[in-house]
Structures are given as C-alpha cells and as structure tokens.
Image (spheres, rainbow, N blue to C red):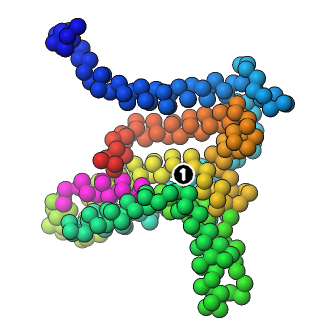
C-alpha cells in the first residue's frame, strides 16, 4: 500500500517507521532484559551454586517477609529522602540566581553547572576520601591550625553517604528548578510589586508557587536516582549504611545468586515506578523532560 493509500485509510505509517529504530532499541535493551529478570526471580539457586529452572515463590517470600530486607529498604528510602530535601534546600538559591542573572552571565553559569556531568560519578565520589579521610585535606588543615591533636574519622557513616549523594544529585535539582523559574513571566512579579507586595511577598505568593513543578520534578529525579545508587554507600558508607541497591549488587555480583538478586531488583523497580506513576498522575512527567532540552 502506498503512502497516499495509508493516509486514505486514516492510518499513517510514517511516524511508526521513524520511531521503529528507537522502539526496537528499547525493546532489545530494556524490555527483553527486564523479562529475563522477571523469569529469573522465580528460579532457585541450588546448594552447588547452579540455577534451578523452576517456578517458585521462595525468593519473593524471602524478600517480602525477611525483616532484614525491609529495614534496608526503609533505610534506603530515608537516605534518599534526606538527600532530596537537602538538594531542594541547597539548590533553590543558585537556581534562582541563575534564572534571574543577566543574560551575559547566564550562559557561563549554566556551563559551570554542567561541569560535574563531565567528570565520572565514581571519581567525584572517591574525591571525598581525599577531602574527609584521615589523611585528607580537612584533617590536614585542622592539624596544621592546631584545632585537633590527631585526625578525626569523618568517613564511612550515613552523613558522608548523604553528602556524597547531594554532591551527585544537586545539579539535577538546580537544572529542574532553573527551568521552572526561567519560564515564569516576569510581568507577574512586577504586577505583584505594583499592587503593594514587598519583594519577599512577591516571591512567596507568585514565584515560589509557580516554581513548584520544577521543584517537584527535581525532587522526583533526585529521589529515584538516590534510592537506586550503590556506588556512594559502597565508597563512603560503613557496614551499617548499605542501601537496597547494594543488596542487589551483593546478591548478583558477589554471591552469583541471580534469582534472589532479580527479585530484589524488581522490588526496588516496582517501588520507584509506583512513585513515578503517582507523580505523573498529579503533576505530569513533562517537566523533567524540559530540563534536558
């Protein structure tokens, strides 16, 4: 059938033809592997280390009923929430400054904001060892100044995990808030000021409410990325600071227990996907895409 014929029947194949490379890539690189993970989660690992092809709910029963996994999951959500709130509090001011900066400075500020993305996430995380370690810069300065007599152990706790996550996630938060602020009509603030509002009142009544979509989008992105990471707690955390993704890594890479690791990863994926669906239902997912245009 020709293109004109397909248009006559009301079905245009051209968009699907253009989308077909992307759809095939998503199917092969995302959908198919996810289906394998679902199948793996119902298999069993034998005492010899081999995977037993069967249909069993033992892995899911262990993941859903064992208090150990529940506690780690709660800890993961708590650390991700603390990191997200910190990013929102710290990131709003620089995002506001960039949005309202003179045009000649805005490009430079945006380039500086993008610089962390040019450095490996692992290198950025490990750099904190040189800053906060026993032989790091902070201890060195305090020893030199006579503030302390011996180095302080500042690494390998929950605080450094949150610090590393904030370091990693903050640019995402600033970008989302900036896009939202940059799209606000400046005349609305001017109108509020002309009606007698102070600068703070205009910000509280006009700017802040209109920037909530960007703040929410940045919070969602930071929370999902923070809850799904395992590098930061592995490098900067102690034995009691493991997050749920570390359990997945431990099960699959260290123990080679693919069935259990698949069940763990699917549980985390389902939880984060539910969060994204709730966000999409009430606020829409388009705001996140605007930050990367």
Specify few, some or many for label 1: CA neighbours under 10 Å numbering under 14, 14-19, or 20 or more. many
- Residue pointed to by mark 1: 226
Horizontal and vertical percent position of residue 24: 42, 25
279 displayed left or right of 183: right
Query: Which is more toward the observer, 206 or 28?
Result: 28
Query: Which residue is drawn at the image coordinates 71% and 88% (left, top)?
Result: 149
Quadrant in which the N terminus appears: top left
Query: Which residue is drawn at the image coordinates 14% and 67% (left, top)?
Result: 194
- Secondary structure of the magenta portion, mostly? helix
Asked if 226 appears above or below 262 in the picture, the reply is: below
Q: Residue furthest bottom?
A: 146
191 displayed left or right of 198: left
* Res 170 visible: no
Asked if 249 appears above or below 149 in the picture, the reply is: above
* Residue 48: quarter of image: top right
Query: Which residue is drawn at the image coordinates 53% and 40% (left, top)?
Result: 272
Asked if 266 appears above or below 145 in the picture, the reply is: above
Asked if 55 appears above or below 144 in the picture, the reply is: above
Q: Which residues are magenta?
A: 171-186
């Amino acid at each position: 059938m020709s293109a004109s014929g397909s248009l006559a029947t009301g079905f245009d194949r051209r968009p699907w033809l253009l989308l077909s490379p992307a759809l095939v890539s998503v199917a092969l690189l995302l959908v198919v592997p996810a289906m394998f993970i679902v199948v793996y989660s119902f298999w069993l690992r034998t005492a010899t280390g081999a995977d037993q092809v069967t249909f069993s709910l033992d892995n899911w029963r262990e993941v859903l009923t064992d208090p150990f996994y529940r506690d780690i999951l709660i800890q993961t959500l708590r650390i991700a929430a603390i990191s997200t709130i910190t990013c929102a509090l710290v990131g709003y001011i620089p995002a506001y400054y960039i949005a309202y900066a003179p045009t000649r400075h805005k490009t430079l500020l945006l380039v500086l904001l993008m610089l962390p993305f040019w450095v490996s996430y692992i290198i950025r995380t490990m750099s904190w060892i040189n800053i906060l370690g026993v032989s790091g810069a902070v201890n060195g300065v305090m020893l030199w100044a006579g503030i302390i007599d011996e180095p302080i152990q500042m690494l390998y706790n929950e605080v450094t995990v949150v610090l590393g996550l904030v370091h990693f996630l903050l640019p995402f938060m600033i970008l989302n808030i900036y896009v939202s602020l940059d799209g606000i009509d400046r005349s609305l603030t001017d109108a509020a000021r002309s009606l007698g509002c102070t600068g703070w009142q205009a910000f509280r009544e006009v700017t802040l409410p209109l920037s909530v979509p960007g703040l929410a989008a940045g919070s969602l992105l930071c929370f999902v990325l923070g809850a799904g990471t395992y590098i930061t707690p592995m490098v900067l955390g102690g034995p009691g600071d493991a997050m749920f993704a570390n359990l997945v890594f431990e099960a699959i890479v260290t123990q080679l227990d693919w069935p259990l690791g698949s069940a763990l990863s699917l549980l985390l994926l389902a939880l984060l996907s539910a969060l994204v669906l709730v966000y999409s239902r009430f606020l829409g997912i388009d705001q996140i895409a605007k930050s990367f245009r």
